[in-house]
Amino acid sequence: MKNQRLSTPVTQPKSPLLVDTGVAKECFRLKAWNALIQRYSVIVSESVVSETQYYEDEILGRVLIDLRPFVSSGKITVEDPSLDELKQFQALFPRDLRYIDKFDAGETELLILLSIRLKCQAQITSADHVVFKTLGRLTAGTTGVSLQELLRVLGINKTVEYKYSKKFREHWTLLGEQSKN
């Protein structure tokens, strides 16, 4: 009998995924949060942590959410951009700084992390059109992913509102690509 060596299974590193407040809340509502954080290396900003406080359930009413235990256990990561990274991000829109003023804090922080710190080597998910439109303007549309697409990857078959759909992401990304000139 040959000497058999047991091989250790090779685990693939989790893909980095930046998650905005609306998607985090919806993942909790759909009971998909645990599957998401098992499959992806989830990154949020401190604004997202503080904004993700609850979701509304038709039967249970307001259901509280606390992301801090996920942070303290290392299941998700909190990263915030520096002032220098903010300036670099603003430099991407030299003729239209008012465009950036339309973003809320969480959107801005995640877009800075994606485009400046991570050099678009991650994905971002949101339910806010301005995120996908900005990705289109930055020619980084392939880094955007809808919740609907994520649920498919996770093997979860749930119906989502339009703002969480692939069509929504594609529509706003295309508008961003068309408006970059």
Image (cartoon, rainbow, N blue to C red):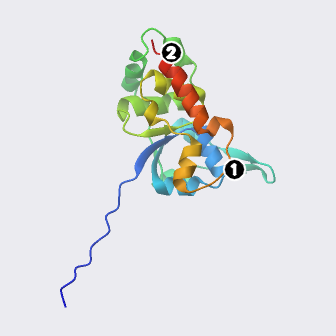
Query: Can you say whether 125 is above or below 150 in the image?
Result: above
Name the residue furthest right: 59
Q: Which residue is mark 2?
A: 179
Compare residues 61 and 32 and report the one nearer the observer. Answer: 32
Query: Can you say whether 71 is above or below 8 in the image?
Result: above
Identified at 45% across, 39% down, the residue is 123
SS class of the residue under badge 1? strand
Q: Is residue 30 left or right of residue 91?
A: right
Residue 54 location, x and y as percent? 68, 45
Q: Is residue 178 left or right of residue 3?
A: right
Q: Label 2 to label 1, Cα distance in Å?
A: 39 Å
Residue 151 location, x and y as percent? 57, 50
Q: Residues within 10 Å of mark 2 (few under 14, many from 20)?
A: few
Q: Is residue 162 among the parts visible in the rendering?
A: yes
Quarter holding the N terminus is bottom left
Q: Residues within 10 Å of mark 1 (few under 14, many from 20)?
A: few
Q: Which residue is mark 1?
A: 64
Compare residues 42 and 53 and report the one nearer the observer. Answer: 42
SS class of the residue under badge 2? loop
